[in-house]
Amino acid sequence: MIKRLFIITLVCLSIPMVSCSQKSDQMDKAEVNVNSSKDKAEQVKHSFPVEKTEAEWKKILSPEAYYVLREKGTERAFTGKYWNNKKTGIYICAACGQALFDSETKYESGTGWPSYWKPISPKAVANEVDDSYGMARTEIVCSNCGGHLGHVFEDGPRPTGLRYCMNSVSLDFIPADQKEAIAEAKEILNSHEE
């Protein structure tokens, strides 16, 4: 009886270990695929056109925006102002105003965060390796100021198969009818895009 109880206990303890290991392997494979499609140069730490001290960022950003954009935090799902926004326009960096995403590429991912299948331009965002919490993920930052926006995953819709999962607090929205403001946000991007 004791031997049978011992065997049952061992089996019960080993099942979660095996399933966690498989999930981790699947995540690692997905991450490798995202990273392998990027240039190695994009995976290194970047320098950014906008450079401010952390004290300067604290003065211009709200505490929540500073936490996410500068300390790489994450807002809670379904709490951000843009996760369910269906208006037409563009999304810009809340820290520096650079154009990042077009509403035409936004989709309902079911995650509670605004999600896009591609940025407004490949040069709008930069990829960095995020190995926090024991996982390897691809972090997405603004290519102009380095502000943390979110992460990219390979479970998005066609045509890219990518899900750029962003924090609402890292973004501001410009409605499509505000053409002058949109042009200004795109000009920031174009000033260093080439």
Image (cartoon, grey):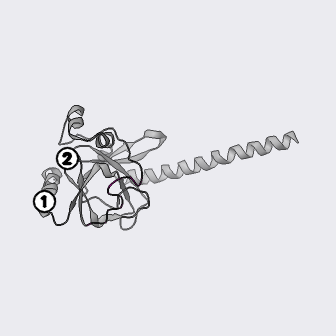
Q: Position of residue 59 (x, y in %)?
A: 21, 36
Give the mark nearer the N terminus: 1 vs 2: 2
Name which residue lies at 22% across and 43% down. Answer: 145
Q: Looking at the picture, which amino acid does disc 2 mark?
A: Cys
Residue extending furthest toward the left: 180
> Residue 30, labelled with which disc?
none
**Residue 139 appears in the picture as rendered:** yes
**Does the magenta stretch mainly form a helix, a strand or a loop?**
loop
Question: Are there few (<14), some (14-19), or many (20+) residues within 10 Å of tag 1?
Answer: few
Residue ID for mark 1: 183
* SS at badge 2: loop
Quick check: is 79 in the magenta stretch?
Answer: yes
- Depth order, front residue of 77/134: 77
Q: Position of residue 53 (x, y in %)?
A: 21, 33
Measure the alpha-carbon separation of dots 1 and 2: 14 Å
From the viewer's perspective, is residue 69 above or below residue 111?
Answer: above
- Depth order, front residue of 1/193: 1
* SS at badge 1: helix
> Residue 96, labelled with which disc?
2
Q: Looking at the picture, which amino acid does disc 1 mark?
A: Ala
The magenta region covers: 77-87
The reply to whether the C-beta atoms of the residues labelled 1 and 2 are less than 8 Å apart is no
Question: Would residue 13 be found to the left or right of residue 113 on screen?
Answer: right
Q: Quadrant of the N terminus?
A: top right
Question: Are there few (<14), some (14-19), or many (20+) residues within 10 Å of tag 2?
Answer: some
- Depth order, front residue of 166/38: 166
